Amino acid sequence: MTDQTNNTENQEINLTHVSKKVKGYFSSVNDSFFDGILFIKRNSIALAMVVIAGAAYGFYADITGYKYQTKVFLAPNFNSTDYLYNQVKNLSSKMHNPEFRKKTGINADKKLSGLKIEPVIDIYNFIDDPAKEIDENDRNYQLFKLISENGDMSKMLKDEVTSKNYKLHTLTITTKKVISENDIKPIMDFLNANPYYKTLQAEYIKNLDVKIAANDTLIKQIDGILNSTAKAGGSGANLVLNDNASLDEVIKQKNKLVKEQGRNKIDKVNFNKIINDTSAVFNGGDDSFLNGKMKFVMPILFLLLFVVAARFKNYYKSQVNKRQIVITEA
């Protein structure tokens, strides 16, 4: 009976202690809140000036520090993807060098502030490229299938080794001012100035011209065979030519050559540059978090600094007063 009485008393004591703690906590919160109201009341003019100063500085920072992004879509030819990535890194490291700017004409008025290149992830075109032969596309598909079965798909798509096989790549040019095509021309000239790839480009174009001429000759010969067959009164796929090839196979061969000629003529257009700039989107907003938002960030930052300074000042005064009291009592 005595034990039960003691337990009850202990529980009542614990509840009373907890109740006092809770009341003390809420009282402390209430005091802090009221102290905040008094602080705002005492410093209302100073706080208003701090907010205005922060907003003014923020507007100024947005105007002078706003950054634009121009995205140029590039198609590297002649297996020059690795060269392209290395040249962009090289350009990034040298773009603030005055001698380099003067020599190349890049960033002459300090508009350029950053360069970044990344692939345009297009796995469907990678495994089914109309410009490639069926066998090559099939090899790409089998390779993609093998890698995807043995690893993380999203990681594999963005992997540096895989990404360099994509056809298009995005060069992001970050600038402090609005730019035009004339401003990116020196960059493209720099990327296309490699002597080795220029020689390779010339040979590619020569071989392509030979291939186009040969295919034109074959198409004319096939047309001659088909015209002769038509004049002889042939009746479709049942007619057998002297080389033992059926008429439908000859027609399929012609269709294949015509498609190949179409690809060859497109390649000839694309081969006009080592790194071909296919299109560009000029002067979009930089997607960084603070770009254009300093007018909102700076007032908050100035307020925080003012509050911290005021709290530190009060802390310093209280510590000085404590020490003066101790010295007086001693």
Image (spheres, rainbow, N blue to C red):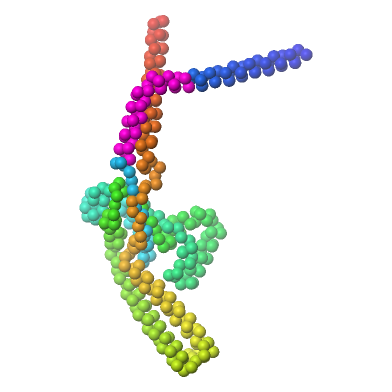
Residue stretch rendered in magenta on the structure: 33-62
| Residue beneath the point at 67% across and 16% down | 12
Q: Quadrant of the C terminus?
A: top left
Left or right: 68 in relation to 99: right
Q: Is residue 61 magenta?
A: yes
Query: How far across and down, in percent of the image, does residue 22 sit?
Result: 58, 20
| Residue beneath the point at 52% across and 60% down | 147
Query: How far across and down, in percent of the image, does residue 313 sit?
Result: 37, 20
Query: How far across and down, in percent of the image, does residue 195 sit?
Result: 28, 64
Magenta stretch, overall SS: helix
Q: Is residue 41 above or below residue 200?
A: above
Q: How many marks?
A: 0
Q: Quadrant of the N terminus?
A: top right
Q: Is residue 201 above or below residue 325?
A: below
Left or right: 244 in relation to 295: right
Query: How far across and down, in percent of the image, does residue 176 sit?
Result: 30, 46
Observer-nearest of 326 and 230: 230
Q: Residue furthest top?
A: 329
Q: Is residue 219 above or below residue 161?
A: below
Is residue 85 shown to the viewer in this render?
no
Q: Is residue 330 magenta?
A: no
Is residue 188 shown to the viewer in this render?
yes
| Residue beneath the point at 41% across and 88% down | 224
Locate residue 323: give its quadrant: top left
Observer-nearest of 59 and 209: 59
